[in-house]
Image (tube, helix red, strand yellow):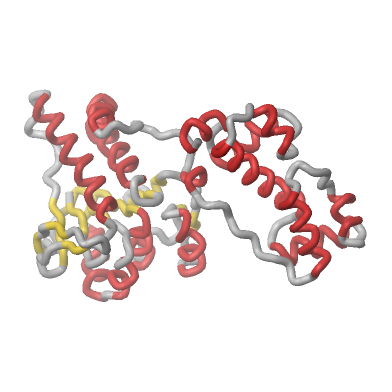
Amino acid sequence: MVILGFPGVQALDLVGPYDVFTGATICLAAAGRSDEGYAVSVVTRDGEPVTTLTGLAFVAQPLPDPREPIDTLVLPGGAGVDDARRDPDTIGWIQIASEQTRRVVSVCTGAFLAAQTGLIDGCVATTHWAFATQMAREFPAVTVDPEPIFVKSSEKVWTAAGVTAGIDLALALVEEDFGTDVAQTVARWLVMYLRRPGGQTQFAAPVWMPRAKRAPIRDVQNAIESEPGGAHSIPDLARRAAMSPRHFTRVFTDEVGEAPGAYVERIRTEAARRQLEETDDTVTVIAARCGFGSAETLRRNFVRRLGISPDQYRKTFA
C-alpha cells in the first residue's frame, strides 16, 4: 500500500485512507489474523517530508522502484496537485508504477493525476464537486460525474470525491478485501457511516447561474429567484419576457445554458435547501412555499437531485 506525497498535498486526503488501512490491519491482528492487512507507506520523490498547505508535515520514504509490484497506489489531491501533475518525473513514475499495481485510487483532486497519466481515459470518474467542471474541460476523454462519493472507474482504478470521501472509498476497499465486519469495525471506530447516505451534491455550494445578456431574460431570472414559489409556467414566463413560449424557451436556454423549467426547479430546490437548514417549518409547509405543491413532490425532487430525502438533509445540515 503506497500513498504518494507531494508539496501542498491535502492532509486529510493522505491521513484519512492511511488511518483506515492501518486501522483495518490492527483489527485483523486483534482477531488473530496478523498475517493479513496492509503495510502502508507514504512516499515522495526524494524521501523528503510531505508538506501540506496548512503547515503539517509527514515523514515519508523515497519513491520505490516503479517496476516493483504495488498492491494499491493512492493518489491524493490538494493545492499542490497542479505542480505535481506538471512534473514529468512524478507523472512518469505513476505511469510505470500503475502497470505493476493491482489497484490505483485517487482522492479528491488526485483524480487530475490519474487523468494526466491517461489512467481514466474513456472512464467515468469523480473528483471534488468544486473542480469537476475544470476536470471535464481539461480532460474531455474522461466522463466526470460530480455526484458520487466514489466511483469504480475501471477494473483497476477507483476515484473518490472531495477530501473525506477518501475515507469512504478506503472503507469500501477494506470491505472488498477483508469483508463487511472488518470495514464496519473500522467505521465505528472512526465514528462514521460505512456507507454514507446520498452523494456529494448535498455538500456542494449552490450553483451560480450565469446572468442573461438580454434584459427581458434577466428580468425573468430575477422574478424566479425573488419568488421561487410563484407561478412560473412557460406561458407565464414568456408573457413576462414579451415573447412567444417557443421563442422564449429557445432564447432562455441559449442565454442561461438551462431550459426554463429546469432553472425554475433548481431555484426552488435551493430555496427549499435554505429553509430546511434555517427554519423549523415542516416539509409540507416548505414544499408549498417553494412551489413544489406537496411534500412528496419535494421529496422526489430532492432524492433525484441530491440523493437524499428532505428529512435526511435537514438532520445533516440544519
Q: Is residue 165 above or below residue 26?
A: below
Q: Quadrant of residue 195?
A: top left
Q: Residue at x 32, y 37 (%)?
A: 172
Total label count?
0
In the displayed structure, 270 sits above or below 84; it is: above
Q: Nearer the viewer, residue 189 or 134?
A: 189
Q: Quarter of the image holding residue 220?
A: bottom right
In the rendered structure, the answer to whether residue 278 lies left or right of residue 209 reads: left
Which residue is painted at 25% across and 59% down in the image?
98
Q: Which x, y percent locates residue 309?
A: 56, 31
Name the residue at 74% across, 55% down. 259
Q: Residue at x 51, y 62 (%)?
A: 133
Position of 9 relative to 169 (above/below): below
Give the image location of residue 290, x and y in percent.
71, 39
Which one is in front, 99 or 310? 310
Left or right of 7, for residue 68: left
Q: 66 or 58: which is nearer to us?
A: 58
Residue 112 position in % (x across, y down): 37, 63
Where residue 286 appears, as percent x and y from the top left, is 67, 33
Query: Is 279 displayed left or right of 250 in the figure?
Result: left
